[in-house]
Amino acid sequence: MTHTNKTRPRFKQIVFEHLRRVRGSIFAAIICIIGSTLTSLIVPWPMKLIFDHVLLDHPLPDLLKSAQPLLHGGSEQALWILCASMVVIALCKGVFSYYQLFLTSRIGYLLVYTLRSELFDHLQRLSLAFHSSTPSGELLSKLTSDTNTLKDVYADSALTFTTHVLTVLGMFAIMFSLSIKLSLIVLASFPVLCLAIVAIYSRVKRSARKQRHNEGRLASRVSELLNAVPLVQAYGMEDYERERFDSESSQSMAESIRTARIEACATRMIEIISAIGTGIVVLFGCMQVFAGVLTPGDVLVFSAYIAQMYQPIRQITRLSTRFSKASVSIERISDILDTVPDIQDAANAISPMGLRGEIEFCDVCFGYPQSKTILKQVNFTIKPGERVALVGASGAGKSSIARLLIRLYDPQSGVVKIDGVDIKDYRYKSLRREIGVVLQDSILFGTSIRENIAYGSPDASLADIEAAARQVHADEFIRQLPAGYDTVLGESGGNLSGGQRQRLCLARALLRKSSILILDEPTSAVDAQSQALIRDALDDMHSDKTILLIAHQFHSIRNFDRILVLKQGVIIEQGTHEALLNLGGHYHELYKLQHGLRAA
């Protein structure tokens, strides 16, 4: 069974490795943050100097005594210099902010790329048991939406948050140097703001978790419906499915609106608190001016800082909602990354080289998660080059044997051997490269026919591809297509017939030139002509290839060397077609049932 490590180590490792790779960009962004913070802090000072030094002829404060030579040429010259300094400060702030935004965005998009690549790679290695129990739409939502959410947090929002914090701290340092009393008045509002931010964060996180869950369900619903469009239209159920979709979509919409309402409430609350704080500071500041303790420029600096200070606080509140949403995304992504694949290589696993094709099942028992046992003490041996068919009623365990052989699952007990070696002692990727597989469902990609046949054998030449296609009688219909082997297929090969798709899948398996070929009911869903062509292709195969065919159509296995008959997970009969008919057992009953249905 797959299981999840709740410590989230893999996610942290990926993020830290990414941050280490982009540490140069992070350092440059930090420089820009410091520059942006400093320029934000000095923005109101030219106005203070204009009011106090130019208009009221107050002496320069001790902190700015070094600027005296620039301003000693008279009031008009000082005014021009101070006004020009405003423009210079704005330009510097703009440059720092531009590069900060560019660098943080770059870091964020690279993080999304890294996370998606790691997540996609991990999803491919997780077992079929995991994929069969997890909706594909939910996985798609985690792969796209959740990773994109983290871009803002681990890059833009994180560094922006740092900028705002540094700005607020710098403003307080300057304000305390000007007036401790007014600074304490401003500071008094902070506990209220912090409590509000914490409360908002927790509420948004709960709402975001529900919202993400609803979005995942909605994505799964859409994926399911798009695959079932022919059935929906055939049964005239468009209105019914529209109602079901609207019902699930409305749940996601309601939760999104609730999250937006919480965020809007938080913003308004911060604005009210900031307005109250500004009014109190201006009132007490002006009283200090009347008392001769402060200058009008000092009050101007305080007012400007308060206006700038509450803006970062509003941004911090907004960022807290982003962090709460991102924490939900982190949980969802980590659930995937920390799920350990069922199938893993042993420490001393080897790569198979030039398999002879001998297959052996020794006392194999197997059952799918949360289901009864499918295979019970299965024993059989297939010699190299032997052609063997598996038959039995649906659910007897035929496909399970094929999945165990290519190690999509591991047995609960017993051993599966190839060439006398337990397949767990092989590297599973190397093992699978040595086995050709044709699945019951014809899986093709929306690429060219050439690429589909060469899938799994990317170095194959066009001559080899054409030879494989001729071997399965597909070359003729391929050359009749508009672009021949370069014809691009529709999604899942929808512009081809079932028989044509299956023959392309068979050509793909043959191109690998493997010593073992597994065919899972290749003729079950194709027309009679395609069945005959596929049977001819099987008959023409070289005798050095071990073939394991899962079959429902008994006429396609008459010439096989041996037939294994499965019933309720146990091999109860084996032999040639004629021998099993003469035996008069379960195979004979299945054959008569099929023959009778076809005769009817």
Image: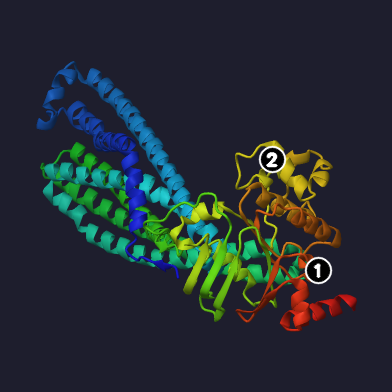
Q: Which residue is mark 2?
A: 464
Label 1 Cα neighbours within 10 Å, binned few <14 / some 14-19 / many ≥20 = few
- Under mark 2, the amino acid is Asp
Q: Is residue 142 visible?
A: yes
Quarter of the picture holding the C terminus: bottom right
Residue 330 location, quadrant: bottom left
Going by the image, does 131 lie left or right of 444?
A: left
Would residue 317 be visible to someone looking at this image?
no
Image position of 267 (left or right of 500): left
Q: Amino acid at mark 1?
A: His
Give me the residue at 43% from left, 42% from top. 110
Q: In the displayed structure, would residue 57 be above or below residue 296?
A: above
Q: Residues within 10 Å of mark 2 (few under 14, many from 20)?
A: some
- The first of marks 1 and 2 along the sequence is 2
Give how far across and how far down residue 491 sits, in percent. 70, 52
Q: Position of residue 211 (x, y in %)?
A: 49, 65
Q: Nearer the viewer, residue 38 or 365?
A: 365
Q: Residue at x 46, y 45 (%)?
A: 113
Q: Which residue is denoted by mark 1 in the rendering? A: 555
Q: In this image, 343 relative to 519: left or right?
A: left
Which residue lies most toward the right here? 600
Q: Nearer the viewer, residue 504 or 218?
A: 504
